[in-house]
Amino acid sequence: MADFGYPSSTVGFSGYPMSTSSTLLTSDVAPAASSAGGFSAGMGYASIFTSIIGAIGSASLARTQAKANQSALNFQSDMAKINARMAERSAQSVLLQGQQQVGALTLRSGKIKSAQRVALAANGVDLGEGNAAEIQATTDLITEVDKNTIEANAIRSAWGYRTQGVNASNQALMSNASASSINPNNAAMSSLMGSAGNVAQSWYAMNKTGAFV
């Protein structure tokens, strides 16, 4: 092979000189490193973006759940108010029935006494003395006992219904207070702030590892 004056280490197979710092080698290494860095940064940004989307989704879900809880508590409050009104109506109905029963008892007692007086008078018995007077007094006593029993039962039943009404009213107040204490926007903001901390930590950790370089 002819010697053109170049060192043998720099001569290629074709006989032409080869540079000791080949541009082919340098071009193969540098772009590969740049591509790897870009890919890493892209993955880092994608991860952060996904975290942000997740944070927004969590905030939206927290707001929706808060609104659902608030609606449920308002519904419970409304139902409790209805139950309280129904309990009071039941109490009034029981008292009215008691009054009607007392009226029917008084009417029946009057008829019984009238029949007794007619029977006693027909037998020539003095209605104001002796057995005749005792019979009428006994009728009055029985009537009074039955009247007191009817009224006591009515009052007892009405008290039971009104106790239920008070409990229902208290439940309505508590449910309403709980519903008023819920703020869907605050729930969303709290969730978003919590997620923001996690996103910031992820950003710091990935940036520290050089993911965004």
Image (cartoon, rainbow, N blue to C red):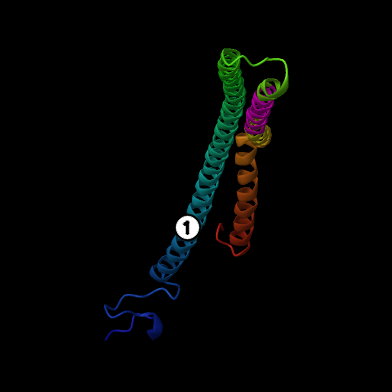
Looking at the picture, does residue 174 appear above or below residue 2?
above
Q: Report the label total.
A: 1
> What stretch of residues is rendered in magenta?
137-157
Q: Secondary structure at mark 1?
A: helix
- Whether residue 178 sits left or right of residue 39 in the image: it is right
What is the quadrant of the C terminus in the image? bottom right
- Give whichever of 97, 179 is nearer the camera: 97
Q: Which residue is mark 1?
A: 43
Q: Residue 152: within the magenta?
A: yes
- Image spot of residue 65 (x, y percent): 54, 41
Where is residue 204? Give x, y as percent: 64, 57
Q: Nearer the viewer, residue 159 or 206?
A: 159
Q: Which residue is nearer to you in this view: 125 or 168?
A: 125
Q: Residue at the location (51% across, 57% down)?
A: 44
Report the amino acid beneath label 1: Met
Please tell me whether the stretch drawn in magenta is mainly helix, strand or loop.
helix
Q: Which residue reaches farthest front? A: 124
Q: Quadrant of residue 152?
A: top right
Residue 117 lies in quadrant:
top right
Rendered view: 94 above or below 64: above
The picture places residue 144, in percent across and down from the top left corner, at 68, 25
Vertical position of residue 117 compared to residue 198: above or below: above
Q: Position of residue 30 (x, y in %)?
A: 46, 65
Dot 1: few (<14), some (14–19), or many (≥20) neighbours within 10 Å? some
Q: Residue at x 61, y 14 (%)?
A: 124
Residue that appears at 28% across and 81% down: 13
